[in-house]
Amino acid sequence: MLVYKNILIAVDGSSEAEWAFNKAVEVAKRNNATLSIINVIDTRSYASVEAYDRSISERATQFAESLLDGYKRVAESRGVNKVDTLIEYGSPKIIIPKKIAQKLGVDLIMCGSTGLNAVERFIIGSVSEAIVRHAECDVLVVRTETMPHNFQPEVATKKLLDEHKQ
């Protein structure tokens, strides 16, 4: 296939994910593709905390909705004609390549290379590595190490992050 029709971009609120998102917007425009933007709320990461704070799940969902709404507005304003957003719950390593990519008929998954430091990658592995290993379609991993030092996110701003920490 020489043209991508269904592109999935995974975002998590990090600058690295937004850098990858910007590239996904350009690929979607060049291919006149549907751009599906997904945020997977990793429920394993806050399951033990939720026993003490029941509102954490609600806050995570509100953050994901705000994030995805912002990304959708940006993609549409830059000329992507068809933009969908999804919030999923569980392990992004499994949900993105095995469940959502197949469900949506995705022919390209894009993601940032990593948001983790070296120790975290060693212990839990990176989501991008899992996507590459398990996806049945093409995967484009955006090297975030090449992200310009002066890159300023439009959506994943400090203000948005601060609003949802409360």
Image: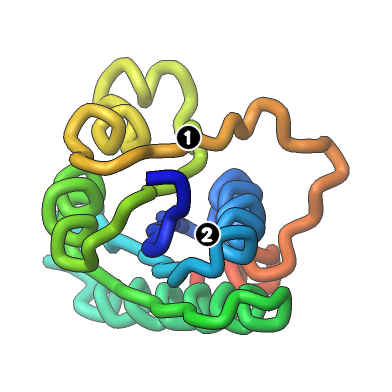
Residue plotted at (35% across, 72% down): 60
Determine the secondary structure under disc 1.
strand
Q: Colour mode?
A: rainbow
The residue lying toward the viewer, choosing from 79 and 39, is 79
74 lies left or right of 37: right
Residue plotted at (32% across, 74% down): 86
- What distance separates the C-alpha of mark 1 from that of mark 2? 17 Å
Structural crowding at the residue carrying mark 2, measured as other residues with C-alpha within 10 Å and reported as few (<14), some (14–19) or many (≥20): many
- Regarding residue 49, the answer to whether it shows in the image is no
The residue lying toward the viewer, choosing from 40 and 97, is 97
Q: Position of residue 130 (x, y in %)?
A: 25, 32
**The image quarter in which residue 119 lies:** top left
Q: Amino acid at mark 2?
A: Gly
Name the residue beneath numbered marker 1.
141
Structural crowding at the residue carrying mark 1, measured as other residues with C-alpha within 10 Å and reported as few (<14), some (14–19) or many (≥20): some
Name the residue beneath numbered marker 2.
13
Residue plotted at (69% across, 72% down): 159
Tally of numbered discs: 2
Q: Position of residue 14 (x, y in %)?
A: 56, 52
Q: Amino acid at mark 1?
A: Val
The residue lying toward the viewer, choosing from 154 and 21, is 21
